[in-house]
Structure formats: structure tokens, C-alpha cells
Amino acid sequence: MLHRNLLLAAVAAALTIGAGPVAAKKMYGPGVTDTEIKIGNINPYSGPASAYGAIGKGIAAYFKMVNDNGGVNGRKIDFISLDDGYSPPKAVEAARELVEKDQVLLIFQSLGTPSNTAIHKYMNAKKTPQLFVATGAGKWNDPKHFHWTMGWQPSYPGEAEIYASWLLKNKPNAKVGILYQNDDYGKDYLDGFLKGLGAKAKTMVVAKESYEVTDPTVDSQIIKLKDSGADTFFNITTPKFAAQAIRKAYDSGWKPLQFLNNVSSAIGSVLKPAGFEQSTGVITTVYQMDYSDPQFKDDPAMKAWEAWMDKYMPGADKTNGNYVFAYNVAYTMVQVLKQAGDDLTRANVMKQAANLKHVKVPLLLPGITVDTSPTDYAPIQCEQLAKFDGKEWHRFGDVICPK
Amino acid sequence: MDLFLQQTSDGLAFGGIYACVALAVVMIYQATDHLNFAQGEMAMFSTYIAYSLLHHGVPYWWTFLLTMAISFIGGVLVERVIVRPVEGTTVLNEVIVFIGLLAIFNSLAGWIWDYTIKPFPSPFPDKAPFGITFIGPHDFGVIGVTLVVLAAVFLFFRFTPVGLAMRAAAQNPDSARLVGIRVGWMLALGWGLAAAIGSVAGMMVAPIVFLEPNMMMGILVYGFAGALLGGISNPVGAVAGGFMVGVLENWVGTYVPFVGSELKLTAALVLIVTVLVFRPSGLFGHVVVKRV
Amino acid sequence: MDARSNAKTRELAALASGAKLSKSQLLGLALALLAALALPWLVSDYRNFQFTLAISYAMAVLGLNILIGYNGQFSLGHAAFYAIGAYTAAIMMEQGGIAYYWTIPVAGLVCLLAGFLFGLPALRLEGLYLALATFALSLATPQMLKYDAISRWTGGVQGVTITKPDPPFGLPISQDQWLYLFSLAVMLVLFVCAWNLLRGRTGRAIKAVRDNPIAASAMGVNTALYKSLTFGVSALYTGIAGALGAIAIQFVAPDTFNFFLSIAFLVGVVIGGLASIPGAVFGGLVIVFIPNFAEQVSKAAPWAIYGVVLILFMYFMPAGIWGFIRMLYARFTRKRGTEKATRALADREQPS
């Protein structure tokens, strides 16, 4: 008797296992139906950081292309982007509107360290993904305490440490002058750089000058830096001030070895206004392709990007690096959605975001991919040093991936 | 000594910009008895118009004059159409309208020309005259232009009948009407002239700071400060005030030890306000005696 | 003129000066209060949050209104007091571990002192010059808040995150509902205090300084003292508003408290209704909801729409929203009053 029951059970089990994969169940979080996925975004379309509004527009255009090609797994993306004017109270209001009123599945690429800091606790309390935030602050890579928040771009401190390491190895007696924006972003770079120099920071750094984003120019600060006798210049500025700083340094006859933060490394929007001659010799780290860089002219990914720009953002300025950034980051988002398949709950979206393995995002530099894991919430960590030779960013050294 | 010279000359160069803005502020104050918050944004908008003209191939000095003319007409229109309905109501109502104008011009500029920085050409040659090297050629040119505009404004208000009529219309509209002055058109003229001067300031500033919609915000504040420091009833005083603010800001940031650049703005403003507390009408302004 | 019409005249005068409320005004007030109390259960948590913010801004607007509308001074620097209140709350709650309700009176007192101290040197400045001085205060505030030396308490450029308080006694309402009710209670207390202050002797002195400072001082009013005190009281209101705002948003960051915020308060004062207490409520609503409205109308240039709305308000409601409502009310009652008076006259002229 027992013998026969056991046999029947074994046969039943074999049939079940052999029957093939169980049909995928559809699991939906808020904002998801069979035909659409609602994604929220907070961007500064007005106010002091309004130049970055181009990113929001670029992402919207990318999603439109995806939708025109059938969407992701048959679902179209409904991209709801709100303006916070780079103001944290408005960001909180926008986040609450997106999560509570619009019922989005996740908030993607919210921009700005202060705005993201303001909604950090809220998003995690509401167990809603705050995915691929548009800031390089070091604090987003903390899966243990903030499971629902993840950055995307290489972190500011990480980049600063690359410069510091290079200096320690190649120019240990450098006298460094630093210009930094007096806010979260500027201080993040500054602290990372000082930490990277370690004990030598006190002797190597001879001058630190800050500026407010409301200041008209940084000319006075550059004069002071030159006067300090520094022969190396770490330029932590946003695009407008970066162009001013590069030009003023040149005009005043100061020719230091200059490190420029990646945030302001776009050839078209920063180096061209500053002047190609003025910018020659500047060093930065790069991880994306630059449209104005002749070496990528014939790259097929770049050509595809150009075609996308022509069709979905006609008339927009292709030399604006924000549009390359938007393309790359939107690609990554779509990759996560693809991996999630029909399990579009918030938990699974987060799980897939923490499960990106060597994803080749089209306009990232060769050798740099997107990688995440449940303990590694920093999608892009690798960068390469590059020097501007008057025409293009000439990469040198190896691709550096901090441990 | 070299640092001192450099900071001073940089301060003077920037002071020239502040002085130019201060002039536009004084112009509108003399003409309308009010401060126009939207002055900076209108100047920025004019500069964008110049940028568009240049991009269509119009040579620089023609662009310059054309922009001034367009700004003049624009200023007159703004006054006649938008500001007129609230003239005669309270000062605060007018201030709100100015704030509205500020928002409109800023937002429209960003929408039409987007927010990335754009280089703007300088009309001045590559080398400063007289072989001067401690001050750049453009900065030198800015100071020169400011002084020329100042002279024109001063002569206009002091020695022309229209200038006199404008001042009268602003200070005592009722009496002015009694002597036959068309007060409404005087106000419009004042706005037009202020807009034209503002456009000059914008075109002088853009080559240094790069053209973008938020370009004038920080500068306008210093322009106001300069105008008030020097005395808002006095164009010469206002210009002097503008230069002083520029130099002061650099000196404070460089030489006051614990301030550095992290408190530069604060320190400069504290200084300006302190001066005002001791000379409430500005350094060169007239003291208004209040009678019962 | 008999005794009855004398009494009637006195009553009308009291009504006009705001010292007393007519029956219909009291009814209107009661209805508004009822609606405000019922709100948390009628709308979502997100809307509760927005209305809590509106309450915070309404108090700031009232503070500024006391200074500008009732005392004739001017300020473009109230963002500084809002900031002081906000940071006081943040530091007390996060660094000091003190409960949120204690932050309200402390923020008020700190700002009372700060406002008074600022008001003293500002006495020498008038009109434009006062505007510039207060403008300078607004501009300097973010930089001062970011100053490294005090960043141990202020959080420097990073700001301070605040934990949201829970409803007391385990009441079955959400945190947002509780915060709304708490803020509403604080607002009502402050508004009643303001109303009392402004209709009494102090209020008359304050208004006298606005209307005719020379005559006022000739009559023995210490104008300097009253002006500085008014600055202090104005700052107190704005400081408490800042504390409540910080608790609602759960975050304070230095660059938020800039001169655009000061300008927003000014817009609230004028569009809500100058020299009016109910106007402040409308001012608060305007600050929160007009930018959202503008963004819905135009994604491309929302601030242009905002500017247009501001200008339209000035064309069609020059006395502010409250002034507009009062005008409507006066027209409505005058019409009915005229009817009644005509009938009374007709009755009297009827041959008996």
C-alpha cells in the first residue's frame, strides 16, 4: 500500500518537474497595468540648476522612442516629470505627489544632492525605489541602511580620489590650489580629494577658495589661487563657472596642471566657450562618449544616438553633454524593466536594479560597464583619466576601478 | 603688491558692470520714483536679442545699436501696456508687477534660448590701449563705455528740457501736469531709456560671465547696492558706488582674514549696510529733510 | 440724535475698525473654522501636507504683514527669520533630542530677539534703503548657514534631516493629519493674539507710526521702540512659521532660505491682502498653490505663467484677495441695507 502511494507521489512529482517552467505570474506594483508603467521624475526645469533640465527632456525623448518601438515587454512608459526648481521643499512636495497622488512605480533620476537628501528617508519609508539618482554624492551607495536608493554616475569622492592618487604617484611635491562650489556637491569632491591625499593633504594643498552659485564670476578667486603659488589646480565647478575659471586662469597668465571635475567636462558646453587654446592640457576623468570628440565620429553607437537626437529632439544642441547622459541613464532604466519582465513590483524592480551584470550601455566608454549587486549599489565605478589636447579628450592610463 | 593691483583692477572691471547697472537703476528711479526689480532680466533678454541678431550675421556695432533701439521700444511698451494699469495704486502693487515681469522675462528667455551657457563676443581689440597689462582689454572697454553712458545720462538730466521734465514728472506728477508736462509719456520715456542702458550693461557683461538666463541675477543685487551706496538721486554717485562695491568685494575677500571667500558676500553686504546706517541717503546723495 | 442711534453709531465704528465682529462675520468665521478642522479627513495625506505648508507660509505672511501693512516698514529679508526658526527646530529636535512642540516657543523667542536686534539699526533706514538692507540679509543668509565653523550644529552644506513626530496619546490618525491639526492650532492661537494686539492700544500706536510718524512721536509715542518691537514681533511670527515648515518638510538646507523665499512672502502679503489678518491665510495658499497651477498650465515656461498670474491679480484685485472679498461683502450688504433703509423710510412716511 505505502509502496504504491510513494510510487504515485514520485510520478506526480516527476510530471510536475518535467512539465516545464511554470507560467510566469503577472505581479504588479502601483502604476503598472498590462499596457503601461508609470515612472516619476523630479528635475530642476527652473531656478539656479535649470541647465540640467535638459536631462529630464532627454529622458522623456528616449522613453518616447522606446514607446514608439512597442514599449518594454509590451508596456509603454508613462513618464511623469515634475519641476522642483532645485529646492528641497518643492522636491518633497513633488515626491509625495508622484508617490501618493500619481501612484508611480518608482522615482527615476531625481536630480540634485539636496533634493535627493530631502526625500531620502521618505522614499525608503514608503518602500519606493529612488533609482539612479542624478548626483554623484557618496551617500547613495548604502544598501544596508537605504535599500531603496541607488545612484548611477561615478561618485564624486571616488573621482577626486583618482586625481589624488595620480598626484601622489606622479607629482608628490605639487602645490595644489582648489576652487570649489560652496554646497554639498563641491564639498563632497573637496573632502574626497583631501581624504585621497591623506596625510600629505596638509602640505600639498596651499589654497582653497569657494564660490556661491549666485556669484556672477569666480575671477577674484582665481587671482587669489594664482597668488598662492599653486602649480596644480583642482577645478570643482559647474559648467558656467568652469568655463570662467579656465579662461581667467589663462588670461591671468597662470598655467597650472589643471584637474577639472567630470561634471563640467563636456567639450561643447564648457571647453568651447572657455576656448580650446585655454583648455589645452586640462585633465579630467571620463566614462561617457562626448559628441564633440572627433574620435567617436564614426562609432555606430554614436551614430545611433545622433539619429535619435535628430528624430526625437530636433533642433536641440548636440554638443550639450546632458543629452548623452540622459540617453545612457534611460537605457539603464529600460534594462532594469526588461529584466523585471512581468514581475513589476517595487521589490522586484529594486532586486533587478541590484542585479545588473556587465551591462553594456551604448555611449559608455569601451571597457566601462554597469555592474551592481545587493551589496554594491554603485552602477558605474570605473573611469579613465583623459587629457584635452585642444581637440579631443585623449584617454591615458588604464581604466581605473576603485575597490 | 601685485595681488593688490590685480584684485583692485579686477574689482574695478567688475565695478564697471555694477556701475552700468546702477545707472539703469538710477535712470528708472529718476524717471519713475521706483526701483524696477525686473531691470536685470530685461537687460538679459536684450542681450539674447543681440545674440540672435549676431547669429543672423548682423555685424557687432549694428547689433549693438539695433539692440539698444529694440530695448528702448520694449521698455516703453512695457510701461505703457503692463505697468500703467497699476501706476497710481500703491507702491507694493507695482513691486508685485515688477516681480511678475522678472519671472516672465527669465522664464521666456530660458524657453526660447535654453539654459546652456553661450559665449558672447567682445567688441574690444585684443590689447588694451596705452600698453596697459594689469587690466584686460575688455574690462578696460567696459569702464570706458560706462563712463560714456554716465556722461550722457548726466548731461541729459541736467541740461536738456526733456530731462528736467522727466525729473519733474517723477517727483511731483500733479504739479508737472499743471505746467503742461505729459507725465504718462515721461514715465514711458524713462522706462525706454532705462531698458536701453540695461541692454548696454548686458552686452558688456555677457562676454565676461557667459550668456545664460540667470546671468544678471547676482549682478543686479550689486548694481542696486552700488546705486544706493552712492546715493540713488545722483547718477555720478551711483556710478561711484558701483565701482566701490566691485573693489570692496574683492578687497574684503582677499584681505580680511577670517572671511576668506566663504563669507565674502556676507561681509561685503554687512559693510554696505553699515555705511548706509551712518549715511542713510548714501555717500553722495542728498539728505531729504522731513517737514511736518 | 437719541441714545439708540448713538449706540448704533458706536457699534458701526467698532465694526469698521475691526474691534468687534458682526453676527454674520462671526458666522463666517465659525464656518471657516469648521471646514479647516474637518479637512484632514476629507483629503489625502499628500494634500494635508500641502495645507500644512500653506499654514506655515500663512503665519510667515502674517508676520511680514504686521511689519509692512500695519507698521509701514518694509522687509525683503524675512527668509532669514524663517531660516532661524527652521534651524532652531532642527537643531533642538535632532541635536538636542527635544520634543517638537517645545521648538515652537523657542523659535519664536529667538526670532523675537533677532528681529528686535535687526530692527534697531534698521531704524535709521527708510524705504529703498531699508529694502536694500533687508535684501542684503536675505542674500547673506544661505552663506552664513553654510559657514564651516558652525556646521557641527547646522549640518553645513548638507543640512539637517528631521524625524517626523507621531500623533500623541496613540490617536488613530496619521502623522500628516496630526501635523496639520497641530499647525492649525498654533496658527489659530497666533492669529487671535495678532488680532488682539492690533486692535488694542499697542495696535493703534503701531498703525499711528505707519500713518504719520511725526504726529505720532509728537503725541508721545516712542516711534523707535515701537518700530523695533514690531520688527521683533514680525520676526517671531515668521520664525514660528519656519519651525513648523521644517517639521512638515523634515529637512532644512541652507540654500533654500534665499531671497526668492523673501519675495514669495511679499507676494503672499500683497495678493492675500495688505494689512489684513484673514489675508494671510490666502497669502499662504497662494504661495503653495499658484506655482503648481502654473506648472500645470505650461510645462515649458511655468514661471512666465506665474508672472502673468501675479500681474493679473494686481490688475483685478489690487486690494488683494481679502480686499476683494470685503468689497463683494460690502456691495452685497449695502444693497440689502439700502432696501431695508428705503422700506424703513417708506414706513415712517406712511401717514399713521
Image (tube, coloured by chain):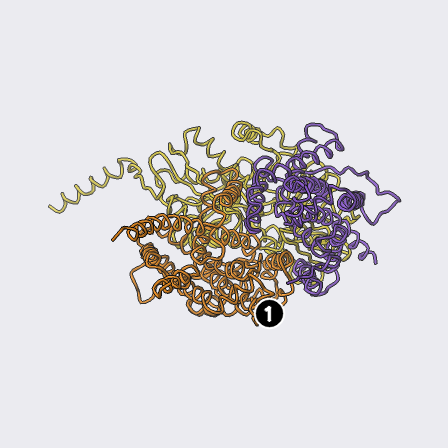
Based on the displayed image, in which of its 4 quarters is residue A210 positioned? bottom right
Q: Position of residue A88 (x, y in %)?
A: 50, 52
Front-most of residues C160 and A5: C160
- The answer to whether A36 appears left or right of B151 in the picture is left
Which quadrant, please, contains the N terminus of chain B?
bottom right
Residue C4 lies, with reference to residue A356, above or below; the image says: below
Q: Position of residue B254 (x, y in %)?
A: 74, 59
Residue A358 lies, with reference to residue C126, above or below; the image says: above
The residue pinned by badge 1 equals C218
- The answer to whether C129 appears left or right of A354 in the picture is right
Q: Which residue lies furthest to the left in this view?
A: A1
Q: Is residue A387 visible?
A: no
- Residue at image coords 77%, 42%: B160
Q: Position of residue B183 (x, y in %)?
A: 65, 42
Q: The yellow chain is which one?
A: A
Residue C196 lies, with reference to residue A308, above or below; the image says: below
- Residue at image coords 30%, 49%: C346
Q: Can residue B215 be seen in this view?
A: yes
Q: Residue furthest right?
A: B130
Which quadrant, please, contains the C terminus of chain B?
bottom right
Tally of marks: 1
Q: Chain B is drawn in which colour?
A: purple
Element type at mark 1: helix
Front-most of residues A260 and C268: C268
Q: Looking at numbered disc 1 in the image, what kind of residue is underneath it?
A: Ala
Q: Which residue lies furthest to the front in this view?
A: C351
Disc 1: host chain: C
- The answer to whether B118 appears left or right of A128 in the picture is right
Q: Which chain is orange?
A: C
Q: Position of residue C248 (x, y in %)?
A: 43, 58
- The answer to whether C193 appears left or right of B50 in the picture is left
Front-most of residues A363 and C109: C109
